[in-house]
Amino acid sequence: MNVVTRLASEIRLMMRRPERLQFAALCYRRTDENSRVEILLITSRGTGRWVIPKGWPMNGKLAHAVAEREAYEEAGVKGKAEVKPLGTYSYKKGMDSGLEIPCKVQVHALKVSGFANNYKEKGQREMAWFSCEDAALRVMEPELKEMILAFETRPASHDDI
């Protein structure tokens, strides 16, 4: 590696912004007596790609409460998010200015108990239920794909936690 390339690489590392934390809800339901799991995905408002509801921390709210709030605001989802996170994934959030912000997303499972008729972002996104396999195929982030696939084999006994 020549000196200029190495220097450019080191400058990029020094200028790299730390990851910003977000909280998300992996909204799910069980469809039948076989306890088949379905995952609710929504489209992002900017790119239209399939995502899960997520947002920035809120003053005075715990992570799982933020996940619940985001699911309600973005998809009208009613339900309780689990306190213990399923895991995290990383992605780059595109901003209106063209900048990309590195984000780490802490994901909380949320069993859907119903939907609101009116909610903040109604009509701004598409929503659809998918099998875990189909949901994993539709999201872009590799760590989120793995989390969704692993969720399919999670025992139904966790639903009451």
Image (tube, rainbow, N blue to C red):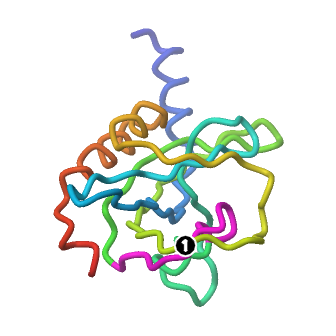
Residue 69: x, y in percent?
61, 75
Q: Residues within 10 Å of mark 1 (few under 14, many from 20)?
A: few
| Furthest residue toward bottom | 60
- Residue 122, compared with residue 118, is above or below; it is above
Residue 79 is inside the magenta segment: yes
The N terminus lies in which quarter of the figure?
Answer: top left
Residue 41: x, y in percent?
53, 48
- Residue 108, compared with residue 132, is above or below; it is below
Question: On the rendered structure, is 145 left or right of 91?
Answer: left
Residue 150: x, y in percent?
23, 48
Hey, what amino acid is under mark 1? Gly
Q: Which residues are magenta?
A: 70-83
- Quarter where residue 8 is shown: top right
- Quarter where residue 115 is shown: bottom right
Seen from the viewer's position, the closer of residues 29 and 138 is 29
| Furthest residue toward top | 2
The residue shown at (18%, 73%) is 157
Residue named by callout 1: 114
The residue shown at (46%, 20%) is 6
